[in-house]
Image: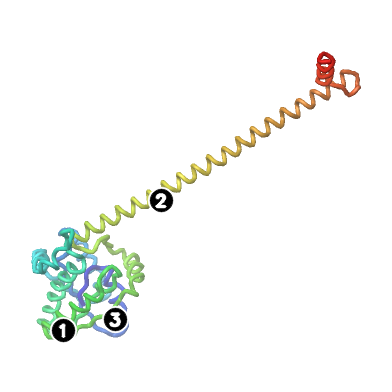
Amino acid sequence: MHVCCGPCSTAPLRTLQERGAEVHIHFANPNIAPADEHARRLDAARTYAKSADAPFVAEAYDPAAWAEAIGCLSEDERTSSDGITPPRERCRACYRVRFEASARYAKEHGFPALGTTLSVSPYQYADIIEEELDRACALFGITPFFEDYSPLYPETISLSKEAGLYRQDYCGCLPSKAEADEGRARRKAEREARKAARAKAREEADAAIQERREEHARYDAVQARKRAIKRALREQSARAGGDGRTALDERTTESEQTDA
């Protein structure tokens, strides 16, 4: 079984062992860069294989082999309109060099079949994985054992966390790291934009509430002044002798007499 890392080997390996399969692990991943990242993933894969009592063998780290595989792509495969290798074709070349290494080892050491845990990731190209696994096995005369393990992906996360395995945040090669970093930066910017939009909406809502409060306060002040005037007029009327005439009424009467 070709494996790419510790986390991705967890659920597939457990599933095959529960079926009674005798699984030997082969770690062949020259695509992983930089070297210290390769070392961390190798250690995690070896650690889990040991805990699962699965024999483990690691291919010598040879990043030049991956670079050569990518370089063997045709010009159309290697370059898109923006000058970047399309991910599907880059991944095809990557699967090819890794599966050929594992198939060669399997043939040389008497293993009848080869499988891979790569299909457990929903971020991989399962159709290309199956095609390249078939190709590598046919090249060395062994049986391909492809299975789509993607339904087990949530389980790999929980199992790897329980085991305390190192969990990477990009596929493996440097182009994938750049793509992952760009995606994270984009998602962070989108989150910040949504956060800013929510903050602005809250500010506008708070401002609207404050405006309504101030409007109510102005209305209450006007009503209070009206009530005060009416109260003052009633009091003035009472002081005038209770005839019901207010100072305003008297002034109005005087004005009418003058006009006459």
Q: Amino acid at mark 3?
A: Gln
From this viewpoint, is residue 46 visible? no
Which of labels 2 and 3 is toward the front?
Answer: 2
Q: Are marks 1 and 2 in contact (CB under 8 Å)?
A: no
Residue shown at the point (34%, 67%) measured from the top left:
157
State the image quarter where residue 151 is shown.
bottom left
Residue under the point 26% across and 55% down: 182
Instruction: Give SS at disc 1.
Output: loop
- Disc 1 marks which residue? 111
Image height check: is 207 above or below 137?
above
Q: Quadrant of the N terminus?
A: bottom left
Examine the rendered structure and indicate whether residue 237 appears above or below residue 205: above
Look at label 2 and name its amino acid: Arg
Badge 1 density bin: few <14, some 14–19, many ≥20, Cα 10 Å: some
| Residue 57, horizontal then vertical, whole percent | 16, 73
Q: Which residue is mark 2?
A: 194
C-alpha span from label 1 to label 2: 54 Å
Amino acid residing under circle 1: Phe
